[in-house]
Image (cartoon, grey):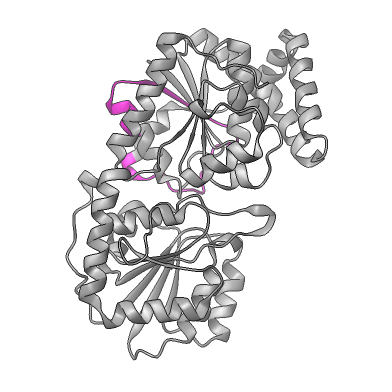
């Protein structure tokens, strides 16, 4: 099978879940191309395990000569797609302009895929990658599919009817996301929206024993932006009464300066370390030493929020106690008292109390974390879920499905 995967950015340090899917596809014998909408990001870390994908990555400049020639070679098609974009996104002019800017690039991708003989296109995220897949798929008569994760569907639903309605199938990472789409986007077919969770390679993650550390170690892994709720974590940490503890914050983002200032103001400088971006091995080492892993997610500006944070899946795979919030699809993974610890968002007192409870009962917390590991093995395993996607790709290649226009 010849599969083209569309992503927004490549590489992207935090998107290990996509990179692991790509590696699983390669191991299954798939011929793969990876098209990234934005230019190559040399400031990001390409993890060692994903190095084979570097040679597969391709990018067409938005207004490069190839893209402009491609859009002009089929003027009626290009005008028709531009009109559909404007009609669907007229109330969101900034999004409309971005979608129009992608049109020439998508036409260039379509010509590539026709020449290559692609069997299927898959877009990772329902935003710009799905726009490229929709345009390139329709122009090249290649079936396409879309992975819908979180803010890519929660922030805005404009153009989703066109992109998902014409897809051979769509995949959401949570039941919450599937229900959201069926309620908010008209004309979608329920039998063509599949729930396939984001996954981790459980076979390569050892089932760890309790952390052997003298100092209680809280860990946050992820980007530093409003929807992640790291400010709530810092407030909760400032209220801890236990004598010895430390916290590692691994990640980068626009809120780093404000969060470091908050940490200083709260008197946490000696206990909280901002580590910046870390590669996969460094993150693995942090999990090993962690007493608890925390994802204090919230609904951020413009509806930006989580699907199911991959860090929570990883934490449970390592048998580490995990705390998160009742936002979006998170309760599908974190079942309070069974697989992890669930609190309401923006509640630093509840977070403080839960951290303290884990500190005071390490054996009970570890048993719950091991229950989380068992759940991850059954529902969030990379090989199982990646092969479910491959089966859908193959099914649509065999049937020649190109999706039906949404009614």
Q: Which of 39 and 314 is in front in this view?
A: 314
Q: Can residue 85 be seen in this view?
A: yes
Q: Can residue 41 be seen in this view?
A: no
Q: Nearer the viewer, residue 354 or 264?
A: 354
* Residue 136 vertical position relative to residue 295 in the rendered view, above or below: above
Question: Could you tell me residue 242's position as x and y percent?
Answer: 35, 89
Question: Could you tell me residue 331's position as x and y percent?
Answer: 43, 57
* Residue 357 vertical position relative to residue 345 in the rendered view, above or below: below
* Residue 188 vertical position relative to residue 403 in the rendered view, above or below: below
Q: How many marks?
A: 0
Q: Nearer the viewer, residue 189 or 286?
A: 189
* Residue 118 vertical position relative to residue 51 in the rendered view, above or below: above
Residue sitting at x 55%, y 75%: 260
Q: Does the magenta stretch include residue 261?
A: no
Residue sitting at x 60%, y 21%: 166
Q: Quadrant of residue 404?
A: top right
Question: Could you tell me residue 154's position as x and y percent?
Answer: 62, 46
Question: Could you tell me residue 291's position as x and y percent?
Answer: 29, 72
Quarter of the image that includes the N terminus: top left
Residue sitting at x 43%, y 74%: 273
Quarter of the image that includes the C terminus: top right
Determine whether, in the image, residue 284 is placed left or right of residue 181. Answer: left
Residues rendered magenta in the picture: 23-49
Residue sitting at x 39%, y 75%: 247
């Amino acid at each position: 099978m010849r599969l083209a995967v569309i992503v927004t950015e490549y590489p992207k340090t935090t998107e290990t879940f996509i990179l692991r899917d790509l590696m699983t596809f390669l191991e299954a014998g798939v011929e793969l191309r990876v098209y990234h909408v934005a230019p190559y990001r040399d400031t990001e870390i390409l993890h060692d395990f994903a190095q084979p994908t570097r040679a597969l990555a391709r990018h067409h400049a938005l207004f490069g000569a190839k893209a402009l020639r491609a859009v002009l070679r089929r003027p009626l098609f290009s005008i028709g797609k531009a009109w559909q974009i404007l009609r669907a996104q007229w109330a969101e002019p900034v999004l409309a302009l971005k979608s129009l800017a992608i049109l020439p690039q998508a036409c260039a991708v379509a010509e590539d895929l026709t020449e290559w003989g692609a069997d299927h296109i898959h877009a990772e995220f329902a935003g710009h990658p799905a726009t490229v897949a929709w345009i390139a798929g329709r122009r090249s008569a290649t079936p396409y599919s879309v992975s819908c994760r979180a803010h890519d569907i929660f922030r805005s639903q404009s153009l989703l009817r066109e992109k998902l309605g014409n897809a051979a199938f769509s995949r959401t990472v949570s039941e919450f996301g599937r229900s959201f789409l069926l309620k908010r986007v008209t004309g979608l077919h329920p039998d063509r929206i599949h729930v396939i969770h984001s996954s981790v390679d459980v076979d390569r993650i050892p089932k760890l024993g309790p952390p052997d550390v003298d100092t209680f170690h809280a860990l946050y892994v992820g980007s530093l932006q409003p929807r992640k709720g790291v400010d709530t974590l810092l407030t909760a940490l400032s209220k801890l009464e236990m004598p010895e503890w430390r916290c590692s914050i691994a990640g980068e983002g626009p809120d780093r300066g404000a969060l470091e200032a908050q940490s200083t103001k709260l008197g946490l400088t000696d206990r909280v370390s901002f580590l910046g971006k870390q590669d996969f091995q460094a993150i693995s080492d942090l999990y090993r030493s962690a007493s608890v892993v925390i994802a204090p997610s919230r609904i951020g500006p413009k509806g930006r929020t989580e699907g199911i944070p991959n860090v929570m899946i990883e934490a449970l795979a390592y048998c580490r106690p995990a705390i998160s919030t009742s936002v979006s699809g998170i309760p599908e993974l974190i079942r309070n008292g069974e697989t992890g610890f669930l609190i309401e968002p923006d509640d630093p007192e509840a977070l403080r109390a839960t951290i303290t409870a884990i500190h005071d009962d390490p054996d009970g917390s570890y048993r719950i974390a091991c229950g989380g590991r068992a759940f991850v093995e059954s529902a969030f395993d990379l090989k199982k879920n990646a092969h479910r996607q491959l089966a859908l790709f193959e099914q649509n290649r065999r049937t020649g499905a190109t999706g039906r226009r949404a009614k």
